[in-house]
Image (cartoon, rainbow, N blue to C red):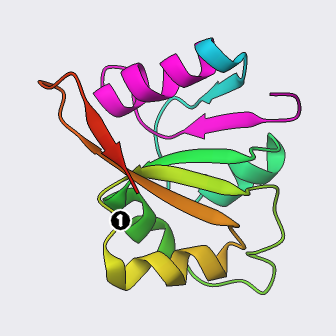
Amino acid sequence: APGVLYGSGMPLYHSAAGMVGMATCFISGITYLIRRKFSASTWLSDIRDYNVTCAQYIGELCRYVLATPDKNDDANNTLRLCFGNGLRPEYWEKFQVRFGIDAIFEFYGATEAPGGFSN
């Protein structure tokens, strides 16, 4: 997918990043941004610095990012899509609006199971 850059703040040994994220990039030919570790305080600057258009999350990561101080230009970034699991309903809209994200998708599955569901 031309112009898509995928970012994940999770380590590759975590199944969401290693199996879902990395596999998506291999199959689609998308560039995969891997950071040494997740940082809520640098998450948005990473999105901007690397022109990330799609980000993967685990719900608590979104909560950590929302806990950082609001800035007037938070929605001024390249991020268009987020997908992951565990984003609590009370944070979903706040996260989407604050960072100007077009769509957020949840998937449900287990590392022990061969299938999953998407919403």
102 versus 29 height, above or below? below
State the image coordinates of residue 56 (x, y, percent, origin top left). 51, 44
Rendered residue at 82%/44% (across/down)? 51
Rendered residue at 70%/67% (across/down)? 102
Q: Quadrant of residue 79?
A: bottom right
48 versus 102 height, above or below? above
116 versus 91 height, above or below? above
Q: Determine whether the residue tagged by mark 1 lies in a helix, strand or loop.
A: loop
State the image coordinates of residue 54 (x, y, percent, origin top left). 66, 45
Q: Which residue is mark 1?
A: 87
Task: Between residue 115 and residue 73, name the one nearer to us.
Answer: 115
Label 1 sits on what residue type?
A: Leu
State the image coordinates of residue 106 (x, y, percent, origin top left). 40, 55
Query: Is residue 30 shown left or right of residue 60?
Result: right
Badge 1 density bin: few <14, some 14–19, many ≥20, Cα 10 Å: many
Task: Between residue 108 and residue 14, name the one nearer to us.
Answer: 108
Q: Quadrant of residue 77?
A: bottom right
The quadrant of the rendering that contains the C terminus is bottom left
Q: How many marks?
A: 1
Task: Between residue 64 and residue 81, name the one nearer to us.
Answer: 81
State which region is magenta: 1-26
Q: Is residue 10 magenta?
A: yes
Rendered residue at 21%/21% (across/down)? 114
Q: Is residue 24 magenta?
A: yes
The quadrant of the rendering that contains the N terminus is top right
Query: Is residue 86 shown left or right of residue 68?
Result: left
Q: Residue furthest left?
A: 112
State the image coordinates of residue 61 (x, y, percent, origin top left). 40, 57
